[in-house]
Amino acid sequence: MITAEMVKNLREKTGAGMMDCKKALSETNGDMAAAEDYLREKGIAKASKKESRIAAEGLANIFVDGKKAVILEVNSETDFVSKNEEFKNMIDSIGNALLKSDAKTLEEALEVPCEDGTVKDLIIAKTAKIGEKLSLRRFEIVSLNEGECFGSYLHMGGKIASLVVLKGADENVAKDVAMQQAAMRPEYVFPADVPEEVLEKEKQIQKELAMNEGKPADIAEKMVAGRIQKFYKEICLTEQAFIKDGNISVSNYVKNHGGEIIHAIRYEVGEGMEKRSDDFAEEVMKQVKG
């Protein structure tokens, strides 16, 4: 008899999915060592060995169902794999599974039911089949309150995903803001989001610049306030000049349509991650020689 404990132990040893472990134990009459060999022969156990490899390519996507949306980023090792239909279908499965859940952390997301097992099982199975390390890097589930709407935009086929929530305005305005966020790469949504240490560092830089221009310290201090407003216009979504009308800010554009920005999320695939130093051709040659 194949027990849940046996499946759990085999899964921990090999990194293979729950259903794969169960099948391996059934095929080998519960022999743990033989089941490990079975998974290795099928290439499934290899998936766990790819965990230390760098996966900074991939795709971001957005899934919306009524008043609920999910934005996520799933990584692969090469851009070549991110264009693979099987990889894209896996992202669809993960996105739709998360859309039905209330997961808040990556740990919770990986345990969400998905196809024949969990999100984690699906990723492990596809890692084994596709032959690259695949991973769910981040996600956020967003729900609308009364009078709110979503605006979403995918750029470069999913290399950048932008999701915004507006109150009082319509979806066309929300999509404009999502496009702005995707194109202009604001680091923060509101000025209040800028960390105090970032703000203080910028104030110090601007004061020194003014003094280097020959301004007295007290005058330089007064100039900082104006320059900080310019700083906000560069890094905050609400303060940026609206791309379709540079005479108004994004915030004013939304206000002119009876709305306000409530929330905004922007994912750019691989941002802040270490990139692979080798190229795809070199990777292919390694596999041929190996």
Image (cartoon, rainbow, N blue to C red):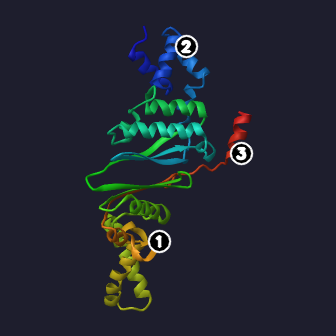
The answer to whether residue 86 is left or right of residue 240 is right
Q: Which residue is mark 1?
A: 244
Is residue 117 in sight in this rendering?
Answer: yes
Q: Secondary structure at mark 1?
A: loop
Position in image of residue 240 (x %, y %) = 41, 71
Q: Amino acid at mark 3?
A: Ala
Q: Is residue 200 above or below residue 42?
A: below
Q: Which residue is mark 2?
A: 34
Q: Which residue is mark 3?
A: 281
**Quadrant (top left/top right/bottom left/bottom right) for the C terminus:** top right
The answer to whether residue 134 is left or right of residue 107 is right
Q: Amino acid at mark 2?
A: Ala
Position in image of residue 189 (x %, y %) = 36, 63
Residue at position x 46%, y 29% in the image: 121
Is residue 52 in sight in this rendering?
Answer: no
Q: Is residue 187 above or below residue 14?
A: below
Nearest the viewer among 75 and 218 is: 75
| Comparing labels 2 and 1, the label whose residue is closer to the camera | 1
Nearest the viewer among 26 and 274 is: 26
Q: CA distance from mark 1 to mark 3?
A: 41 Å
Q: Is residue 260 above or below residue 245?
A: above
Q: CA distance from mark 2 to mark 1?
A: 64 Å
Badge 3 vs badge 2, beta-carbon distance below 8 Å: no
